Amino acid sequence: MAFYSQTNRRFKGLEIKVGIFALISILALVALLAFVIQRSDIFSPSSSLFFFVKSGEGIKEGMPVKLSGFTIGSVHKQDLWDMSQVESHQSAGLSGLAVKVTLDIKTRYLEWIPMDSNAFLRKENVIGDQIIEIIPGASDTSVKEASFVKFEKEKTLNDYFELISEQVKKVQEEAANTMKYLNDPDGEVRKAFENIHSFTVGLVETREKIDKSFVALDNTLLTVNEQVLSMSQEAHLAIQDLNRALGTTNAALPGTFKKIEDSLESIANVTAELQGLTKTLSQDLPEIVETGIDVSQDADSVMESLKKTWPVSSNIEPPKSAPMEVDSYGGK
Amino acid sequence: MFPLMAYAMALAVWAPMATGAMAASQEDEALKYNVRGAAAASGNNYTRALRLHQLALQARLAADDIAGAIMEFHNIAVDFMRLGNIPQAQSRLAAAVEIFEQETKMGMGREKETAMQDAMARITILNAIINLDSADPAKAEQWATQAMEHCRKAKCALMGRILNVMGRVAVAQGTLDKGRTLATEALVENKKSKDQEETANSFRLMGEIAETEGDAEKANEAYLLALGLDRDLKIGRKIAMDLLGLARGYRLQKETGQARLFATRALIVANAAGYENGAIAASELLQEIQASP
């Protein structure tokens, strides 16, 4: 080295330069490593949650666990489990042998998972990998380390197909029944159609009859029209006769009116005389009536006295009230 | 003290007398209207008769004279019947029956009961006659049966009339044998009571029965007997009926000339007597004779 430094000036202080370079490289490497570690979250504290499923099919260790689309942990492990040892509220209706799935959740996310949250096994998208998704519940209390979460298997396409298949089967059965009902020769629908058919045929016949009737009516109207024309001519002649008669009457009327006028004049004179007489009478009438009443009352009194006087009284039969006689043919 | 006692005693004596006097006055009023009503009816002025009989009824009711009131109801019904208002006539008869039933429930003396039964015999037989002329012989029979009961209780003088009506009912119901028996019984009863009008009716009824049976000779014989009595009584309506019966009888015997003669006489008498139904029947018979002599 000394030789190189003596023969070429560029090699002078080479050792120091290499040392500085190595040190910077090491520092950069350490910084990069620290950055990567920090980014990978490897050393973040985590907590476990668990649930039970009948079958571990589709669930794999390391499978991501997501909350609202954000990865908060992964499937830690799966163990076979005897459900008789599990408390009933955690068994989710399972019995016998089941699979206990333990999730590894970053502890800092536990506070976002309420106690009544549900875990689902679902596909991230149509062709994506399967994940465990936690759907937060409504409870105010969050899960803690080693808490149980409910698991519900999300319906797969197969499930939907089966469901749809069942519905389609039902629809097919209903359709078959309906067709059978519609095709039944003794059924109401067939009979109704038969009736409609008969009715339609009847309508055609009725239409033909109506057409014939209209033709007959036309003929009748023609006849009536002819008769009316004939009558009109006769009436015209009769009106002419009447006009002639009225002409004669008109000629005779002035004389008749004259006579009527004379008669009316005579009547008017008589009426005038009567009015005068009535006026005189109306002045005298109240007095005459009053006098008449007095005379009548006096006459009654005299007659009553006379009736009671002997020998007149012996000749007067006292009046008797009697029913009106109606004989056996009385009503006729 | 003494004047006060004397006043009290006088009042005690006077009060019943005054009440009696008041009732007597009402009875006089009723009598007056009844007699005037009868006079108006005999002159065929039934409108006036009706008014007077209504006043008589008012007076009878004011005097609490129930038998008299029933009689006035009867008279009013007759007036309505003659005026052609049958529903009004029937309503008055129904009112009379109701009053009688109420009075019967309350009980009454023997003398009063006889008067009431007599009045009711008239009411019920008039009801029977109205129903018979309204072509309801079943109802007429019921009323006639009631009339007979009332008449028997009162020993009334209407038995012959009631039997005649029952005979007419039997003829209307088509039971001619029963009708003949009743007409014969009626004839005996009417002759016994010397009721000429009802005797003539019995003869006419016999004539109608014989005519219905087709025995024209017997029918004419009976009609002639009836006609003789009715002529004596000068009752135009009845004379027209008898003449009409004779016309039908002669027509039955194919004696067209005699039939036409009697029908014409019947028409003249019916018109003169104001007997419209008789005139119509006579005209129709004449037309029939003209059409098929």
Image: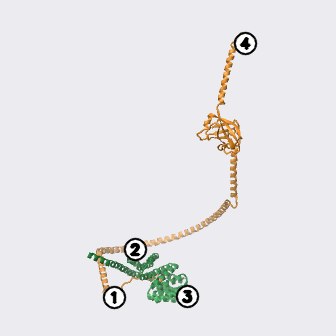
Chain colours: A orange, B green
Nearer the camera: disc 1 or disc 2: 1
Q: In the rendered view, does A42 fall on the left or right side of B184?
A: right
Residue A256 picture location, percent across and down: 40, 74
Chain assignment, label 4: A
Q: Would you name the residue on which mark 1 appears?
A: A314
Same-subunit check for callouts 4 and 1: yes
- Which of the two discs, 1 and 2, labels the residue nearer the N terminus? 2
Chain assignment, label 3: B
Kind of residue sitting beneath label 2? Thr
The reply to whether dot 1 and dot 3 touch (C-beta < 8 Å) is no
CA gap, disc 3 and disc 4: 187 Å
The kind of secondary structure element at disc 2 is helix
Chain assignment, label 1: A
Kind of residue sitting beneath label 1? Ser
Q: In the rendered view, does A264 fall on the left or right side of A164?
A: left
Chain assignment, label 2: A
Q: State the mark number for residue A1.
A: 4
Q: State the mark number for residue B258.
A: none
Residue A96 picture location, percent across and down: 71, 44
Q: Would you name the residue on which mark 3 appears?
A: B215
Kind of residue sitting beneath label 3? Asp
- A145 or B123, which lies in front? A145
CA gap, disc 4 and disc 1: 204 Å
- Which of the two discs, 2 and 4, labels the residue nearer the N terminus? 4
Q: Would you name the residue on which mark 2 appears?
A: A256
Same-subunit check for callouts 2 and 3: no
Quadrant for the C terminus of chain B, please: bottom right
